[in-house]
Amino acid sequence: MAERIVKVGLVGFGTVGTGVAKLIAENADSIAVRTGIRLKLACVVDIDMMSVRPVKLPDGILTDDLNRLLSDDTIQIGVETIGGTDMARNIQLKMLEAGKDVVTANKALLAEYGNELYRVAQKNGRCIAFEASCAGGIPVVSAIRTGLAANNITAMFGIVNGTCNYILSNMTSKNEDFCEALTQAQEKGYAEADPTLDISGGDSAHKLAILGSIAFGCEIALEDIYVEGIEGISISDIRYGTEMGYCLKLLAIGQKDEQNRISLRVHPSFIARDNALARVEGPFNAVSIFGSAVGQVTYYGRGAGMMPTASAIVADIIDVALGNSATTFRQLNLRPRSETAPFIEKIDNIVSRFYIRIMCKDRPGVIAQWSKVLADHQISISGAIQHEGKGPENTVPVVIATHPTMQKNITIALEDMEKLDVIGGKPVCIRIVDIPEDKD
C-alpha cells in the first residue's frame, strides 16, 4: 500500500498536546502500515517555547506564531489542545476559515459554542472531530454516531468525571471524608489544584451536553442541564446508603420518553450495589447507553490523562485523514435549539425515588409529624432506618427511602420538614436512580 503523508498542526504543547506529539512520533510507522496514512507533525504552536517536555521535536517545529499553521496550505488538520473557551474558540474558527479540519478534546468549548463551530465548519466544507472531548480514551462518541446509528437511543447513564469517581470511591471503600479524599485525588494528579469544575458537576455537564446532542439529535444548551455536585456529600450518607444496598456515584443522565421529551441532569445518585456502574472504581469512566434495537451497551475505560486523551485525539486525526470524519460530520444534523427547547423536561417534573436523612429531636410524636408532611405531598415511604445514638441538639438520624415521586413534591416537602421544631438542621436529599437491567 502506497503511503500518503498527512501534515498536522498542533496548537497547545501542554500535557495533552505533548501526548499527541509523542504518539505521532512513536507510532507513525505502525499507523502507516495499518492505514496507509503517514502522519507528520509539521507545526506545534505554544506560547511557552522554553519548558522541557518528555518528547523531542525536530528543529523548527515549535513556534509561538499561530500564523505559521494557518498560512501553511500543506497542513490539512489542525489540533487544538489549549483548553478554555474564548481563545480556543477563536483559534478553531481561524483554522476552519483557513481550510483546516479540526480535532479537539475541548468539552467546555463544544458544550458552550459547539453549535456555532459546527455551522462554521459546514459552511467552509470542513469537519470537527471530537472523540476525546467526552470520556478520554473511551470511544463513546463514535459509538453513538456510527455504531449505534440504527438505534433510537432512549437513555444514557454515565460516570464521566474521574475526579469525582475517585473521591466517592475512596469515601466508600476507605472510609475517608470528602476533604481527605479530595486531597488524595490532588496528590495523585486526578484533581486540579482548583477542583471546582469537577466537584461542582460542571465538567460532567459539559460532556453530557455533547453526548446528549448527538444521542438525541438536537442542539442542547448548558442551561438545559440540571447540575448538582458532590461538595456536600457526607460520609455518613454513603454509609447509610451502603446499608440500604446502594452505591453513590456522580451520574450524567440523559433520557428521552415516548413523547420525545428529554431530561438532562448531573447529580449524586444512589444506584443498586450490583449494577455494573457501581463497580466502576477510582478515576475510571463508564457510560451505559440504551438503544431500541441493541438494548444496553456499556463503554468503560480511562476517561482522562495524557495518553488516554492523546489516544482518542490521534484516532480522530487518522479518521479525518482517511476521510471518514468528513462523511460522518456532514450527517451531523441536529434539530435547532428553537425546536428543541420546548421538549426539555425541567427537573421539577422528573420522577425519581429519593434518599432523605433528617435529624429528629428525641421526643414523642416526631415520626407522626414528619410522616404527615410526606403524606400531605403524596410521598410514599418504601423504607426507613433509625439507629440509636445522639447527634447535635439531642437529635437522632432517621433515613427514609421513598417510592417514585416528582421532584417538585419532594422540594416542597423538605421545605416544610425544615420548619418543624422537631427537626434539627436542613434535611439531606439524594436521588435514588433505578438503572434498567437488560435481561432476557
Image (tube, rainbow, N blue to C red):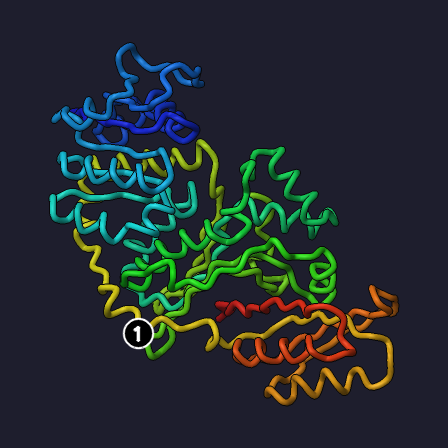
* Front residue of this view, candidates 273 and 257: 257
Residue drawn at x 68%, y 75% is 418
The crowding category of the residue bearing disc 1, from other C-alpha atoms within 10 Å (few below 14, some 14 to 19, many at least 20), is few
Q: Quadrant of residue 75?
A: top left
> Which residue is rendered at x = 56% and y = 79% of the image?
404
Residue 2 place in picture, x, y as percent: 15, 25
Q: Amino acid at mark 1?
A: Pro
Which residue: 21% across, 29% down?
36
2 sits to left or right of 152: left
Residue beneath disc 1? 342
Residue occupying image coordinates x 24% and y 21%: 65
Could you tell whether 386 is left or right of 70 in the image? right
Relative to the observer, which residue lies in front, 273 or 91? 91
The answer to whether any part of residue 1 appears in the image is: no
Q: Does 118 appear above or below 382?
A: above
Q: Is residue 336 visible?
A: yes
Local SS, label 1: helix
Give the vertical position of 307 relative to 259 (above or below). above
Residue 127: percent from left, percent from top: 19, 44
x%, y% of residue 109? Answer: 33, 46
Residue 209 in the image: x percent, y percent?
37, 56
How many numbered dots are placed on residues in this image? 1
Res 87 quadrant in image = top left
Location of residue 26 by image quarter: top left
- In-front residue for pair 64/173: 64
Determine whether, in the image, residue 197 is placed left or right of residue 5: right
Q: Could you tell me which quadrant the N terminus lies in? A: top left
